Image: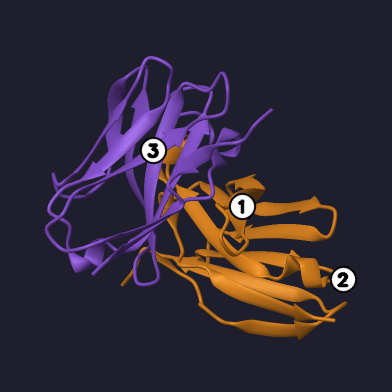
Amino acid sequence: QKEVEQDPGPLSVPEGAIVSLNCTYSNSAFQYFMWYRQYSRKGPELLMYTYSSGNKEDGRFTAQVDKSSKYISLFIRDSQPSDSATYLCAMSAQSGYSTLTFGKGTMLLVSP
Amino acid sequence: KAGVTQTPRYLIKTRGQQVTLSCSPISGHRSVSWYQQTPGQGLQFLFEYFSETQRNKGNFPGRFSGRQFSNSRSEMNVSTLELGDSALYLCASSARQGARQETQYFGPGTRLLVL
């Protein structure tokens, strides 16, 4: 079993839809959880960062962590064509990015 | 402020050759990390350099090596290339060693194709 599982997609939605992206993990030591967005031919950029369980909201984006289920989610409200990208979840047991374990990414396509 | 730059952007090599990739971090950043991204394995940490010293290393064979110069620029070298080394190689910079995740910035990557 991979440490971090993420459905590769693609996930196709119409503009304005609410998008739900998810990752499951097996290592109960993970405490730091991140979501990155990666456009084609670009490097990943950090979208959301959360520590331990709970929700965090930033504009149209909401990150949710459920440590009891080892499940994290990223919700995008009012999705836009510019949200079309690959979304990577990442997590680590300690602070420090060199220890990050990434999911393989979910490709999201938002059609106008 | 200019972002992280990587050169070259695209590279084609044949099996057995070696390759050197370059990364220039954001001005003032002293930590440079390298990652390999493939469809099969996703994004995997290679190593981190800070003040010209390797501080952390991922689980990759010794064919993968790197170095950092006094101006914080970094190079990554892969010797005796294998087909499986075809990947997007990403560099990320940060101000401090092992800094918190939200302070790391990625470059656009070098796409390496091994034939």
Image coords of residue B11 (percent x, y): 36, 57
The mark found on residue B22 in the picture is 3
- What's under tag 3, amino acid-wise? Ser
Q: Which amino acid, by three-letter code, is at mark 2?
A: Asp
The relative height of residue B20 versus residue B30 in the rendered view (above or below) is: below
Q: CA distance from mark 1 to mark 3?
A: 38 Å
For disc 2, the chain is A
Q: Nearer the viewer, residue B73 or A26?
A: B73
Q: Would you say A19 lies left or right of A43 here? A: right
Question: Which chain is tinted orange?
Answer: A
- Between A57 and A66, the one nearer to me in the picture: A57
Tell me how far mark 3 sits from mark 2, CA to CA: 39 Å
Q: Residues within 10 Å of mark 1 (few under 14, many from 20)?
A: some
Instruction: Name which residue type carries label 1.
Output: Ser
* Left or right of B66 on screen, residue A42: right
Residue A27 in view, yes or no: no
Q: Which chain gets the purple colouring?
A: B
- Read off the residue under disc 1: A53
* Residue A16 makes an appearance in the image: yes
The front one of A54 and A97 is: A97
Residue A96 location in percent, x, y?
46, 35
Q: Which residue is mark 2?
A: A78
Local secondary structure at mark 2? loop
